[in-house]
Image (cartoon, grey):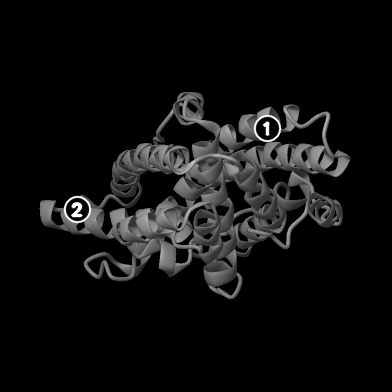
């Protein structure tokens, strides 16, 4: 498949984007806890009508905290993977090398960005929230898979980020402006990363036979299973934090209902929205149409 993307144009676009972490957070730039942080399409709290409006907003904000943490977590394996891929290209096309190194540098900046926003969240929220990890252990488990499988996961995440901002966040006037600013600036750079990772996936898939491509998708799905299991534990931590923050102890029936709704919300946010992105599916189709067909049969469970 021929893509409309190339390393030279992606590099030029990245170099036109100028922002620093320090420009987005700190001083009078603080999260506004009088507003929700996540769009309802991700948070899915409004259907939990047994909770008060305030309690639903607290749960929404806790989901925002998990978004900050989990994005920082996945950047922890994206950065070393891109660096390793760039290292193997050092004697190749100059634009490719520079674009991949720019990609890696921006991912390092994103780790810092999500860390700083999470620090601001915890200072404003007033109590700790447990998280899955440590990130280094999860990164090792992901990077233990073959390169094409990992590249597919990264491609999923890059297109997922595009969908989050463009479909659900950009036009939502109700969420915290500071949280929205974070997601906008993250999206600006990830827009180029999605193109670069599309090229990286195509390069890694080139020359591989059908069996090898199928194994790569197996690896992608295995990594997805690891991440899905992490979401289950993170949700349990979220609900514990919700009860501490609000003083509202959920009944067994209420907790079961909240878990069911929030489980599917988290699955859509981090898994389904990437699995079903048209550009992600197009990359699978370009590798082997059978891979796209297989993905389309798996994805509905995560939507």
Q: Nearer the viewer, residue 225 or 29?
A: 225
* Label disc, if present, on residue 255 of the rendered structure: 2
Secondary structure at numbered mark 2? helix
Compare residues 46 and 121 and report the one nearer the observer. 46
Residue at 71 percent of width and 58 percent of height: 188
Q: Residue 281 in the image: x percent, y percent?
A: 49, 60
Nearer to us of marks 2 and 1 is: 1
Residue 110 appears left or right of 32 = right
Quarter of the image with the C terminus is: bottom left
Spatial separation of the CA atoms under disc 2 and disc 1? 44 Å
Image point (48%, 61%), residue name: 38
Q: How many marks?
A: 2
Q: Let me know if residue 199 appears in the view.
A: yes
Q: Quadrant of residue 50?
A: bottom left
Task: Give the residue drawn at x 42%, y 39%.
Answer: 211
**Residue 219 place in picture, x, y as percent:** 42, 37
Dot 1: what SS? helix
* Horizontal side, residue 138 vs residue 202: left or right: left
Please give the residue where the numbered disc 1 appears in the rendered image.
85
Q: Residues within 10 Å of mark 2 (few under 14, many from 20)?
A: some
Q: Earlier in the sequence, mark 2 or mark 1?
A: 1
Where residue 130 appears, as percent x and y from the top left, is: 39, 35
Residue 32 — which label?
A: none
Position of residue 114 in the picture relative to residue 276 (left or right): right
Any part of residue 71 in sight: no
Position of the N terminus, as image quadrant, is: bottom right
């Amino acid at each position: 498949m021929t893509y409309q993307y190339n390393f030279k144009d992606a590099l030029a676009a990245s170099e036109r984007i100028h922002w620093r972490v320090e420009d987005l957070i700190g001083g009078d730039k603080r999260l506004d806890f009088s507003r929700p942080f996540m769009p309802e399409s991700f948070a899915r709290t409004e259907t939990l009508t047994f909770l008060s409006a305030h309690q639903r907003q607290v749960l929404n904000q806790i989901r925002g905290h998990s978004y900050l943490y989990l994005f920082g977590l996945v950047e922890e394996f994206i950065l070393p993977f891109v660096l390793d891929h760039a290292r193997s290209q050092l004697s190749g096309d100059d634009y490719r090398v520079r674009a991949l190194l720019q990609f890696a540098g921006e991912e390092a900046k994103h780790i810092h960005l999500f860390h700083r926003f999470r620090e601001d969240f915890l200072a404003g929220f007033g109590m700790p929230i447990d998280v899955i990890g440590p990130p280094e252990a999860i990164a090792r488990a992901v990077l233990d898979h073959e390169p094409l499988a990992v590249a597919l996961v990264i491609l999923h995440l890059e297109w997922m980020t595009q969908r989050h901002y463009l479909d659900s966040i950009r036009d939502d006037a109700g969420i915290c402006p500071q949280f929205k600013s974070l997601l906008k600036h993250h999206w600006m750079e990830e827009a180029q990363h999605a193109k670069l990772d599309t090229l990286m996936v195509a390069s890694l898939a080139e020359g591989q036979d059908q069996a090898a491509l199928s194994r790569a998708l197996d690896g992608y799905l295995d990594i997805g299973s690891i991440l899905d299991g992490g979401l289950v534990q993170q949700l349990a931590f979220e609900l514990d934090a919700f009860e501490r923050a609000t003083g509202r102890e959920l009944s067994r029936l209420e907790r079961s209902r909240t878990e069911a709704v929030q489980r599917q919300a988290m699955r859509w946010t981090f898994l389904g929205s990437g699995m079903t992105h048209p550009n992600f599916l197009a990359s699978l189709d370009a590798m082997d149409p059978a891979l796209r067909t297989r993905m389309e049969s798996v994805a509905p469970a995560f939507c």
